[in-house]
Image (cartoon, rainbow, N blue to C red):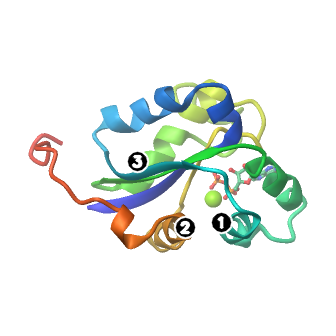
Amino acid sequence: MEREFVMIKPNAVKRGLTSEIIKNYEQKGLKIVAMKMIKMKKSQAERLYTQHKGKDFYEPLLEFILSGPVIVMILEGPRAIETVRNINGETDPLKASPGSIRGKYGLSVRKNIVHASDSNKNAEEEWKIFFKEEEIIEYRNGLENEL
Ligand code: IDP
Ligand code: MG
């Protein structure tokens, strides 16, 4: 089992796409083990995007991500990281497959609807920015043999 950190970006929350997006992960068979809406602090945004510091899109990206509430969540399932990144689609919505979340709802690279971590190590580092250990809830949904 793997855990993946996912964030619904502010433009998608404002556009009322939250339920539509979560549906993709849930119906794929991934289990939500933590979730909340937050107004991100600048220090949290800087930690989340630390690997992009210095790039030309870094400052506008921080401004965008702080521009409204986001939904943060942790999803659990077999190969959850690759699965979620596949559901999200490529970074550029133009190149993302039309059936992916970014392919369906995105237009610009910066405002590409969703975030998901790219490795086990980064997933853990990133969810720790937003969640305390006790906010991650372990439970059985009875689907363990059905996936
Ligand atoms: P990812 O979100 O697909 O993992 P990353 O390369 O990690 O893509 O970039 C993080 C985020 O930074 C992207 O989701 C996007 O919002 C933004 N971003 C990446 N490259 C560009 C760019 O060239 N222009 C504007 N924004 C970008
Ligand atoms: Mg990334």
Label 1 neighbour load within 10 Å: few <14, some 14-19, many 20+: some
| Quarter containing the N terminus | bottom left
Q: Which residue is drawn at 47% across and 39% down?
A: 87
Q: Are marks 2 and 1 in contact (CB under 8 Å)?
A: yes
Real-space CA distance between mark 3 and mark 2, rounded to the nearest whole angstrom: 18 Å
Disc 2 residue: CB within 8 Å of ligand 2: no
Q: Which mark is residue 48?
A: 1
Task: Tell me residue 96's x, y (percent).
Answer: 62, 35
Where 16 sits versus 125, above or below?
Answer: above
Asked if the beta carbon under badge 3 is closer than 8 A to the nearest atom of ligand 1, the reply is no
The amino acid on which the numbered mark 2 sits, given as a three-letter code, is: Glu
Q: Which residue is drawn at 54% across and 64% down?
A: 130
**Residue 120, picture quadrant:** bottom left
Q: In this figure, which residue is indicated by the disc labeled 2? A: 126
- Residue type indicated by callout 1: Leu
Quick one: label 3 or label 1, which is nearer the N terminus?
Answer: 1
Q: Is residue 87 left or right of residue 107?
A: left
Identify the disc placed on residue 83. Answer: 3
> What type is the residue that disc 3 sits on?
Thr
